[in-house]
Image (tube, rainbow, N blue to C red):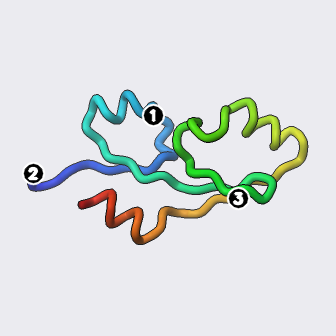
Amino acid sequence: MAYFITCCSTCDLTEEHLSALGVRYGLYHYIVDGKEYPDDLFKSITPGEFYGAIERGAMPTTSQITVAELENLVE
């Protein structure tokens, strides 16, 4: 394949939709209440847990994917 399309996990599409289109995606990371999670389309934490933490005053922070993760994405 001469090229492929990629995006990040913040694209607001489901894993099924991305897979059906053959789009590779990188998982951003976020921290809630001192714990780091991959933005894995709500597999590691449910939407209720995430937004519930925000309702209780948590302030999530985010970070981009690492160089190693990017290399794995495009290999």
Find residue 74 and report its horizontal and vertical position in percent.
Answer: 27, 59
Q: In this figure, which residue is indicated by the disc labeled 1?
A: 13
Find residue 41 and report its horizontal and vertical position in percent.
Answer: 53, 38
Q: Quadrant of residue 31?
A: bottom right
- The numbered mark, 3 or 2, whose residue comes first in the sequence reads 2
Furthest toward the left, the residue is: 1
Residue at x 41%, y 63% (from the top left corner): 69
- The numbered mark, 1 or 2, whose residue comes first in the sequence reads 2
- Secondary structure of the residue carrying tag 1 is loop
Q: In this figure, which residue is indicated by the disc labeled 2?
A: 1
- Locate the C terminus by quadrant: bottom left
Which tag is nearer the camera, tag 1 or tag 2? Answer: 2
Structural distance between the alpha carbons of marks 1 and 3: 21 Å
Q: Which amino acid does label 2 sit on?
A: Met
Residue at x 45%, y 34% (from the top left corner): 13
Q: In this figure, which residue is indicated by the disc labeled 3?
A: 61
